[in-house]
Image (cartoon, helix red, strand yellow):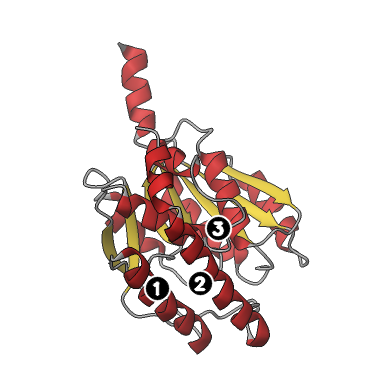
Amino acid sequence: MAETKKNQKKKDTFIIVMPVYNEEHCIEKVVRSWMNVVNRHTGSEMLAINDGSKDNTGQMLDKLKKEFKNLRVIHKTNEGHGTTIVGGYIESTKTPHGWVFQTDSDNQFFTEDFDKLWEQRHKSVFILGDRFKRFDPSHRLIITKINLMLIMILFGRYIRDSNVPYRLMRIDYLKKLLSVLPKNLFAPNIILSILALKDGHDLIAIPISHKERKTGKISIVKWKLIKVCFRVVKELILFRLKLSSVLKKIPK
């Protein structure tokens, strides 16, 4: 009986998954801020995945790891944001935690908003932050609008911030979605949001604050922006074509 209570208590903890790439100017501030959140929830932890950073980000993460025992750091070769996120999600399914929270390392979010999502965890297995006002360059806003229209056209549903890197998901359900998630996606969070919605789950959207990026370098510009748009469109169309078969494969 004591062991059962212990397991139930552990299930009410979370792991933060944070992909990191070339963020030496803000990574210490970001990690410390999120570790304050983690330390308020006994038994929770944070996983920072260094996606082959070329600056001092890796060294700074290793230094922080020595200070925070509930901070895990993984170093790997550069594979891109999407692949890194999926890798982090897979790692989260190997832990005893009940929930995974994903956020980015660019210091554009407020840790204070986390509790807004956490307090709603008993209402949904898939909770999204909703950036009601975004402070992003125009090209990112363009991609978001294209994505929003495509989802409505292809899937007949409205998800205002389907790619938001501020989301709380129950790990046992995320594991089911990962088992059918297409490989090598540029934007896996978009597909995961669509999967959860089409699988019959309510995606609770919680308004959160957003702020301008002050450090780092935006990599998706000019010609690369056009390529990204085409890739996202292609991924959504291909996923729509096989949606029915994918939904049938989700474990019950």
Identify the disc placed on residue 142: none
Nearer mark to the viewer, of 1 and 3? 1
Q: Secondary structure at mark 1?
A: helix
Within 10 Å of disc 2 (Cα), the crowding (few <14, some 14-19, many 20+) is some
User: Where 249 falls versus 26 (above or below)?
Assistant: above
Provide the residue designation for mark 2. 233
Q: Secondary structure at mark 2?
A: helix
Identify the disc placed on residue 31: 3
Which residue lies at the image location 36% right of the left edge and 77% below the top edge? 149
Within 10 Å of disc 3 (Cα), the crowding (few <14, some 14-19, many 20+) is many
The residue closer to the viewer here, 6 or 161, is 161
C-beta proximity under 8 Å, tags 1 and 2:
yes
User: Where 70 falls versus 216 (above or below)?
Assistant: above
Provide the residue designation for mark 1. 150
- Under mark 3, the amino acid is Val
- Under mark 1, the amino acid is Leu
**Gap in angstroms between the C-alphas marked 1 and 3:** 35 Å
